[in-house]
Amino acid sequence: MCGIAGAFDLTGQRVFDTERLLAMTGAITHRGPDDEGTHIEPGVALGVRRLSIVDLTGGHQPIANESGRIWVAFNGEIFEYPEIREKLLSKGHHLATRCDTEAWVHLYEDHGPAMFDHARGQFGVSLYDRDNRTLILGRDRVGICPLFYTIQDGWLIWGSEIKAILASGLITAKPNIKGLDYFFNFFSASPHQTPFEGIKAIPPGHFLKVRDGRIETHKYWDIDFPDSGDERVAADPAILIDELERLLAHATKIRLRGDVPVGSYISGGLDSTVILGLATRERGGPVDSYTIALEKAGPDEREKAIEAAAALGSPLTMITMEKKDVAHAIPELIRAAEMPILDTSAGCLLRLAQAVHDSGNKVVLTGEGADEALAGYAWFKSGMARERFRKRFGSAIPALLRRGILGMIDTDSNARPDRFPILGQRTAQQDLYDWLGQGRSLLYGDRMWQELDGYNPYEDLDLPNQRFGKWSWLNQSLYVGYKVMLAGMLLHAKGDRVTMNASVEGRYPILDDRVVEFCATIHPKYKLNGRIDKWLLRQVAAKTLPTKIANRKKTMFRANRSDIFLGPQHPAWVDQLLSEESIRKAGYFDPAKVARQVRLQTTLPTITPRRFVMDQSLTCMITTQLWHHIYISGDLCDLPRWNQPDQFRKIQQSHRPISSKLS
């Protein structure tokens, strides 16, 4: 993958300053250390930092069509590009490179903005049509590649990372209170908001069309499920097992494409091991694998990973992390993610991606997406049990139990999100969201509540599918998982941002469009069969892996949370962030409330709902303080803050204008 950035004049044909564009691309050099390119003409500027994976010498960007009318800068991969290339050549298109970037200009020539229907893969793309003065900014279907934008001084500014936008100098980093509160409710980034005021994200499966100063948002794809009762059922499940295996094998095969080596993550679980097994079978030989060992810092899966790698003949690279190692990785993680984080294991993945890079690999396969497609998380099981109870005995008892648990956490009405069902339904995740949302009242200061002014984060979920109410309860819950947690956390803080921080491209076979669409069509019993999660994937695993490995129980890779910040050997910057002075400077939290919760969290040994919630909420609180220090103020602790690249500082020192009219 790469990193893209650019600017489009919404008011006329001003020329964007070259050094300013280079400052933007310079801020995301880690996304593309191999090459740099720009294209600037009146009214538009396109910039790229390239990570060379396909056509190493010929894939320079931005690239244009034969006439120079259409220009594109591209981040990502179109995995079926060889097939698309043959179709384009058969239609008479001239292709100057072997790189998939060039496909975009010709797909646009043939289909206009409908080009997204013909490009399957992972991508963030910017395309400019000079004749029509039209800009297209688009993002892949499930949200693997990020793309952000803002409007300042008549310019639409965009970038693969927010750093690129900040480096333009057109916007000052300020907190978006609603974006932060969204995170505290759903422990994920919003699909369209960011924690930065005035900076938005293009949602997965969407593109912006910009023409004549008007910005239109279009949705070109959304996951769909059959009506409840109309899901696909096979007289012989072997038909579905074989079909999923075939789809996964193809998805893995095309993600092994490239002119550089491809490795694979592996854990003690099933998903990544299946992918490594399929990759090994496709390659006909060993594929390098990478794993993490946690030394008293969370559930340790090293023995299972070693066993699986040995069974598949895979050379295994293992990094070991203790609590202090996880804690020391968090500042770099926040700089990479550009948002607070809940899941501290993302810090482990940050270090693992660096190990991939250090070993000489640029691409790594992962097993992300199986839990969303086939109901792998614990809350799907507990939610299904609750749903069966509700159908048999009614909703009064579950509601009473829920209120009782919430009351054990806190009774502050400000933080009672249980009155907000998701699109009229209580999905599997709702109880967890309700519990975690309660932690806000135990930490927020009065100023936060005042600025939120009754804001309802559930109205900001951006789940517009009109067919939602026709789906089965489990498929409704899976849809929320795709839309909220997958793109907002797993593919953000644990995916693109940590791999690209190390100049490594992550690839996700289980998130292949056809795999996702197939899993959506099948009956829920093939996903969650009694207490057996990911039933259909387990049957595929039984055909490709040793029985002992295929039958492993679901394990969630996670590191310890708040105790890495509060226990022995925690970094000095944690105490600085938790000081009354720092908390008051940032202005989000109440110092007395924070001190009380820290004291209780470090002294109460009993496992209670309140302790569980505060484990999550204190982690969110500390990383929010850290995010504020790194990106907003720089005065809460002794750690360095993020600074503009050298190019922008030179522009400031020389007092150069932001843009100029053509003479």
Image (tube, helix red, strand yellow):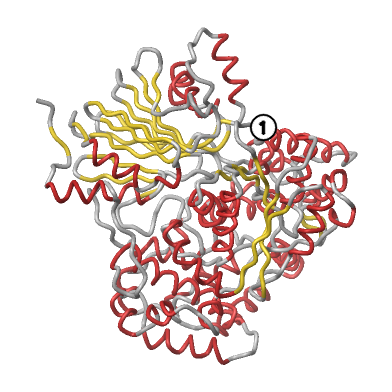
In this view, 500 is above or below 197: above
> The disc labelled 1 sits on which kind of residue?
Ile
Q: What SS does tag 1 mark? A: helix
Residue 426 position in % (x across, y down): 60, 62
Say which of 425 and 594 sits in front: 594
Residue at 40% over, 48% down: 161
In this view, 173 is above or below 591: above
Residue at 75% over, 36% down: 249
Residue 650 position in % (x across, y down): 20, 48
**Which quarter of the figure has residue 83?**
top right
User: What residue sits right under mark 1 in the picture?
Assistant: 254
Residue 268 position in % (x across, y down): 75, 60
In this view, 65 is above or below 192: above
Does residue 659 appear to the left or right of 260 in the view shown?
left
Q: Crowding near pointer 1: few (<14 within 10 Å), some, many (20+)? A: some
Residue 535 position in % (x across, y down): 81, 52
Residue at 58% over, 14% down: 87
Does residue 653 appear to the left or right of 91 in the view shown?
left
Q: In which quadrant is the C terminus drawn?
A: top left
The number of callouts visible is: 1
Say which of 22 and 421 sits in front: 22
Does residue 450 appear to the left or right of 1 in the view shown?
left
